């Protein structure tokens, strides 16, 4: 007598399924929502992912997992029309958002590469429009690399690609495609009579009316997923987005075939679970590897705050970076190194070795300090490698800002000396009753500090000589014209951003040698505002710099906070421009590089043998 298989609607099986899947449903839903919430606030906001699409992707995965647990807990109780409608709807929504995130990642990689080739800010003529990537030569754009955008790059401009792959555009495409899928699944399950006629004792299996859906999923698994693995292999992003996409693709290649085939092959033998269990396990692996693991890594450091979507650690005091665009100009020619001077040694660094300035990785065998970042920025070869890692981190505009910021200071400082030195010196002579004596000039051998002596013609004491330094912007101009990059030919072509970062405020430095017999002279600048104002000829440079890096519609715009953009825009609207207008942006750029790019650069380069 042959054995008879137990009835699948037996109460014992129903009770066991409920005891297993309902607790899993509650625990996983709570775990998923909690980790996704913290992931959004600690990881997603600082990454380059499209936020809303990523949220929809996570919610679709959660809805699919809830459907899997509920359908297995109440197996054979749901009508096939409802069961398949929920399965296929959430599956396709997840696929749509996953492809949108992958397309955005590919586009960001191309844009970051192209930004390295954007022409520098024009300082000699007026730039009418903000910077656009359309100025990049074609060989460096999408057509010049083996990427999914190669074909589009040959036919569309960068502006069209930017419009197509922007988060708003991808969100609209996602919404439209989701609506089409929703209508298709709803109409199909309403008109398909065979889905309503399935007996309670049998599973749903595959339905012929969903053949277009099966073809679409097969195309994704057989063609799209291997293509993604092949095309994203050359990508190196420092945010770990490529790793997340690769893990998700591999898991999908395994889980989805099991989801569709197990119920069809083992339709009469599966009592406690169907093929959806494999899909649930796959989504658990995806969630842990792409959400939980990046979230746990953020607990190695204190909870940061975010500026414009970037991680910003508040433990670094801004005054250690410099309160002005170029701090410590008074140290030029002296023995005290600047906080951002090239060839900075740890023993001579003026920055204290406080724990708050250390950024150490718990898993790294060699930590890094702010001094290491200063030395990297001040060294040509190391800065080139840091620039490469900034490109991998989708932050090419940060290093471009530093380079053009240096060029701006190099142009402005000599212009200040040429236009304001004579007027300031004349005003000083009129106030202190001094006359310039051209026979007394003292220059150091390095040529980095020039002093002019002025002889007093005070009638009460005509032999008193009062010595003053030249106006500080004259000192800056002299230093800038005497190979300030240490006689390095390569640096002359690509000077380090550190140099112009150590030039300080345009304040006069004066010294007296009158033996205390006369009063101290008046300040060298009669107008206190003159010490930071731009000459009229430099306004074009500043406005071009503003259009390139501050205006939101520029492709090279910095991802600064809205408050900072508003402040800089208000300063630019004034009639009087000053040197400190980009100070706050400069501070943020340095900190953003230190927090988001430098850790990845340092640990990789140290392992490669570049650490000192």
Image (cartoon, rainbow, N blue to C red):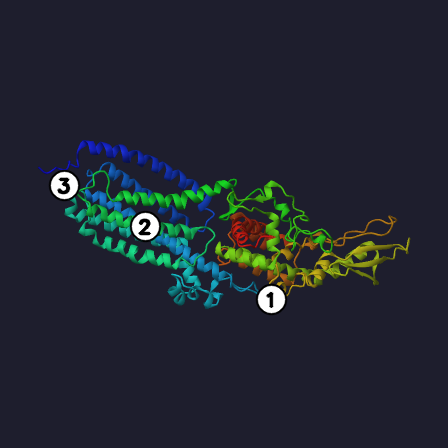
Where is residue 234, by image quadrant? Answer: bottom left
Q: Which of disc 1 and disc 3 is earlier in sequence?
A: 1
Q: Is residue 578 visible?
A: no
Q: Nearer the viewer, residue 530 or 305?
A: 305
Judged by depth in the image, the label closer to the viewer, 3 or 1, is 3
Callout 3 environment at 10 Å: few (<14), some (14 to 19), or many (20+)?
few
Q: Which of disc 2 and disc 1 is earlier in sequence?
A: 1
Name the residue rendered at 37%, 56% in the picture: 229
Q: Which residue is mark 1?
A: 124
Alpha carbons under labels 3 and 1: distance apart: 81 Å
Alpha carbons under labels 1 and 2: distance apart: 54 Å
Measuring from the top left, give residue 87's x and y in whole percent.
26, 45
Q: Which residue is mark 3?
A: 199
Alpha carbons under labels 3 and 2: distance apart: 31 Å
The N terminus sits in image quarter: top left
Q: Is residue 128 visible?
A: yes
Q: Nearer the viewer, residue 354 or 497?
A: 354
Q: Residue furthest front?
A: 1
Where is residue 231, by image quadrant? Answer: bottom left
* Residue 53, placed above or below residue 303: below
Measuring from the top left, give residue 463's x and y in whole percent.
90, 56
* Residue 3, placed above or below residue 351: above
Q: Which residue is mark 2?
A: 252
Q: Which mark is residue 250?
A: none
Q: Secondary structure at mark 3?
A: loop
Q: Secondary structure at mark 1?
A: loop
* Residue 124, placed above or below residue 237: below
Q: Secondary structure at mark 2?
A: helix
Measuring from the top left, give residue 539's x and y in whole percent.
61, 60
Callout 1 environment at 10 Å: few (<14), some (14 to 19), or many (20+)?
few
- In the rendered view, does 252 fall on the left or right side of 293? left
Count up the numbered dots.
Answer: 3
């Amino acid at each position: 007598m042959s054995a008879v298989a137990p009835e699948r609607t037996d109460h014992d099986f129903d009770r066991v399924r409920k005891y297993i899947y309902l607790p899993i449903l509650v625990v996983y839903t709570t775990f998923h929502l909690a980790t996704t919430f913290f992931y959004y606030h600690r990881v997603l906001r600082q990454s380059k992912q499209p936020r809303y699409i990523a949220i929809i992707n996570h919610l679709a995965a959660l809805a699919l997992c809830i459907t899997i647990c509920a359908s297995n807990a109440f197996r054979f109780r749901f009508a096939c029309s409802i069961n398949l409608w929920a399965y296929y709807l959430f599956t396709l929504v997840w696929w749509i958002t996953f492809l949108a995130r992958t397309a955005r990642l590919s586009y960001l990689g191309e844009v970051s590469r192209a930004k390295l080739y954007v022409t520098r800010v024009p300082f000699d003529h007026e730039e009418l429009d903000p910077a656009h990537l359309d100025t990049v030569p074609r060989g460096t754009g999408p057509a010049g690399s083996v990427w999914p955008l190669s074909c589009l790059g040959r036919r569309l401009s960068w502006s069209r690609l930017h419009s197509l792959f922007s988060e708003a555009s991808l969100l609209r495409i996602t919404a439209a495609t989701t609506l089409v899928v929703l209508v298709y699944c709803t109409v199909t399950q309403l008109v398909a009579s065979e889905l309503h006629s399935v007996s309670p004792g049998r599973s749903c299996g595959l339905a012929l009316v969903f053949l277009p859906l099966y073809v679409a999923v097969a195309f994704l698994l057989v063609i799209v997923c291997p293509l993604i693995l092949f095309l994203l292999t050359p990508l190196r992003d420092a945010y770990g987005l490529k790793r997340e996409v690769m893990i998700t693709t591999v898991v999908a290649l395994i889980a989805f075939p099991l989801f569709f085939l197990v119920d069809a092959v083992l339709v009469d033998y599966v009592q406690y679970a169907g093929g959806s269990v494999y899909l649930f396990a796959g989504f658990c692996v995806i969630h842990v590897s792409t959400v939980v693991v990046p979230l746990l890594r953020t607990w190695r450091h204190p909870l940061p705050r975010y500026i414009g979507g970037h991680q910003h650690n508040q433990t670094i005091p801004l005054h250690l970076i410099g309160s002005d665009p170029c701090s410590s100009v008074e140290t030029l020619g002296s023995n005290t190194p600047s906080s951002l001077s090239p060839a900075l040694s740890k023993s001579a660094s003026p920055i204290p070795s406080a724990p708050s300035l250390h950024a150490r990785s718990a898993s790294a065998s060699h930590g890094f300090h702010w001094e290491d970042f200063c030395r990297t920025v001040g060294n040509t070869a190391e800065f080139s490698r840091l620039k490469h890692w900034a490109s991998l981190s989708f932050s090419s505009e940060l290093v471009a800002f530093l380079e053009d910021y240096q060029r701006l200071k190099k142009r402005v400082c000599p212009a200040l000396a040429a236009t304001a030195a004579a007027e300031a010196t004349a005003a000083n002579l009129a106030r202190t009753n001094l006359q310039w004596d051209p026979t007394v000039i003292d220059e150091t051998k390095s040529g980095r500090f020039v002093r002019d002596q002025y002889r007093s013609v005070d009638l009460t004491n005509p032999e008193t000589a009062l010595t003053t330094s030249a106006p500080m912007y004259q000192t800056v101009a002299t230093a800038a014209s005497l190979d300030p990059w240490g006689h390095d030919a390569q640096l002359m072509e690509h000077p380090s951003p550190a140099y112009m970062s150590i030039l300080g405020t345009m304040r006069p430095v004066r010294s007296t040698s009158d033996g205390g017999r006369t009063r101290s002279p008046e300040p060298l600048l009669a107008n206190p505002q003159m010490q930071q104002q731009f000459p009229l000829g430099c306004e074009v440079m500043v406005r071009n710099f503003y259009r390139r890096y501050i205006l939101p519609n520029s492709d090279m715009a910095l991802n600064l906070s809205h408050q900072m953009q508003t402040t800089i825009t208000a300063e630019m609207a004034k009639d009087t421009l000053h040197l400190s207008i980009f100070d706050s942006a400069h501070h943020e750029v340095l900190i953003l590089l230190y927090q988001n790019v430098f850790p990845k650069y340092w640990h990789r380069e140290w392992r490669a043998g570049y650490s000192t």
